[in-house]
Amino acid sequence: MSLMFDTWVLFVRAIKKLIRTPILLFFSLFQPIIFLVLFTQLFKNFGQLPGFPGGNYLQFAVAGIILQNGFSSALQSGTSIVDDLTSGFLQKVLVTPVNRSAILLGRLLSDAFRVLVQSAIILVLAFALGATVVTGIPGILLIFLTVAFFGLAWSGISLTIGLRTKSAETVFGIGGTLTFPLLFMSSALVPVGFMPGWIQTVSKLNPISYTVDAVRVLTSTGFDWGTILSAYAVIGGIAIVTLGATLYLFRKVVS
Amino acid sequence: MYIVSDILIRTAFEGLRDSMSEIITVKDLVEVYSDGTKAIQRISFDVDEGQFFGFLGPNGAGKSTTIKVLTTLLRKTSGAVTVAGYDLDKDPKEIRKLIGVQSQETVVDGDLTGKENMILQGNLHQMRGRSLEERVDELLKLVELSDVAKKRAAFYSGGMKKRLDLASALVHRPKLLFLDEPTTGLDPQSRATMWTYLGKLNKDEGITIFLTTQYMEEADKLCRQVSIIDRGQIVASGSPSELKQEIGADAITLSFAEDDERNGGAKAKARELLAAIPGVGNIVDSDSGMTVYAKDASSMIVDIVRAFDANQLHLSSINLSRPSLDDVFLKHTGHRIRTEELVKPPSGMRFRRGRR
Ligand SMILES: Nc1ncnc2c1ncn2[C@@H]1O[C@H](COP(=O)(O)OP(=O)(O)OP(=O)(O)O)[C@@H](O)[C@H]1O
Ligand SMILES: [Mg+2]
């Protein structure tokens, strides 16, 4: 009862803050939109290469770009908690009888919500450019669920860094440094078959590839449950580790 | 027979008072930070219900540390503490329902409006709906922020933020209010306004107030009970007038000219001269000279100046004052509370008048 209400209250607060600093939303959407518009133009002819899956670069890249957005906005999550720590807001909340778990839940849910909204924007834009989702509405819903779950798992990483270092710059720095190599060495923007051997190896180990593949089958092939479920298994594994670490550090801050 | 019964009644009465009216009890509290800093050495004090209690001390004395422990934010190293009738270790959750806290750094969410800040605070105390709304409006009126209630708190002046912070600590009608330096950094006018609110809250609403401050005038004016803390230890406790009476005399503050001050011999010589003047009480060294306590100090000034002149001791100033809490502090610690600049206008203050 108190958990749900408290989570809701803190969730709404986070969303209000997000809406009122649109510049943040703009920046995190800016990159995927540039990718969507520019990359898909730039690499348009890739689709014609023999062996390119589906023969259409835009259709191929949408999944990768949606995930890129999920990835980079989840990595910002840690900066919000650092803000609350250094401004004293967290302490102010902690002297109230608020349910302790609600503080973390409200944060995570608002992160997931944010990723969802951004994914919807990207998807609408992709549709306008001519991309499709072959699995229809159910497929779109499943894409959203996958991306939200993925976002949660990665939020855990930035929250852990944030709680550990208490420095927004560090969160930004590490997040920014991680994003590009992980993204480019995954199946997000280039088909694995087109990569040099060693990147293929990295890409196969890269957890992002699994999620991208799952979203990609939903946009382009159909409900391939094997691919989808293995993505969930990988994300689940990451989530347990990152959210476990977050919970552990958060408990330390709270007590 | 009569005496005995009187004593019996009195002990019974005091027993009753002990069990019923203490809203904070602290026994042998020690706080050592993880880096080894001994912020609180070992302090004990009680605060009665309805009291306006002041914790007076200089920078780094341990005021905020004590508040953090009492408000369940910081785990104590050792000692026994009860707040609002509950044990700090066993029932922190019950304590949190009953206390209001304003921390030293003003905390308002700049992205939310003043009113939203207050509503959020009420929600976190499980309040909602019409009654919360009414309570918030009432408080915004009290701290004179009704006009700007719908404006984002980021655009408030420093004084307005402090008032909003105070108001949001009151939403859930706490029994006990902790205020960590609520007037530090405010201009004199805002400070006076804050004093008025605090007096009202204590007197009219019966809220017990635990306030920390570095300003003796503030403690003197507001608090009925004061503990003076320095370097993690309580050096004196009592009502401001009791504490000042304890000094029992006026204070003559002497400052030496610079070259004499460096010369250690000057102080010894001065001490000798002063001791020879009839009526001189306690003599205490202070940073730039010494303070002499005496019953009828005004008649003594001439004697002091004459004696010093005759012995080539150069005074840069001589000052007579009724005893203040600063003298109490000096008497117990051998140094004065460093009164930093009293007026440090918070940023953003400029637009305040136009807006109201
Ligand atoms: N987190 C911390 N870790 C280590 N030492 C600390 C910490 N917080 C405070 N201290 C130290 O504990 C002592 C007491 O600090 P505290 O903040 O309680 O003082 P204060 O009386 O509130 O001072 P001020 O008037 O400046 O606010 C100081 O020596 C301070 O340096
Ligand atoms: Mg302090």
Image (spheres, helix red, strand yellow):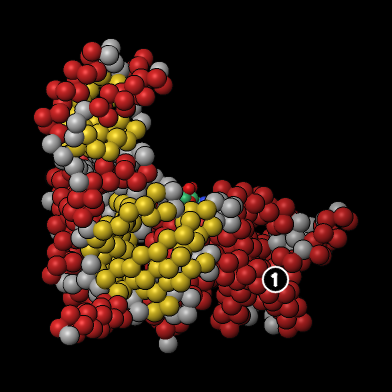
Q: Is mark 1 within 8 Å of ligand 1?
A: no
In the image, residue A127 above or below residue B247: below
Residue A245 lies in quadrant: bottom right
Residue indicated by mark 1: A241
- Looking at the image, residue A103 sits to the left or right of residue B219; the answer is right
Q: Is residue B312 visible?
A: yes
Residue at 21 percent across and 40 percent down: it is B350
In the image, residue B123 above or below residue B335: below
Disc 1 packing (10 Å; few <14; some 14–19; many ≥20) = some
In what element is the residue under mark 1?
Answer: helix
The front one of A58 and A251 is A251
Q: Position of residue B151 (x, y in %)?
A: 24, 57
Q: Is residue B219 visible?
A: no
Q: Position of residue B256 (x, y in %)?
A: 30, 21
Residue at 68 percent across and 54 percent down: it is A178
Question: Which residue is farthest right?
Answer: A197
The front one of B191 and A123 is B191
In the image, residue B71 above or below residue B8: above
Q: Position of residue B243 (x, y in %)?
A: 24, 52
Residue at 59 percent across and 77 percent down: it is A145
The front one of B76 and B247 is B247
- Residue type beneath disc 1: Val
Residue A5 lies in quadrant: bottom left
Question: Which residue is farthest left?
Answer: B299
- Looking at the image, residue B92 sits to the left or right of residue B24; the answer is right
Quarter of the image with the N terminus of chain A in it? bottom left
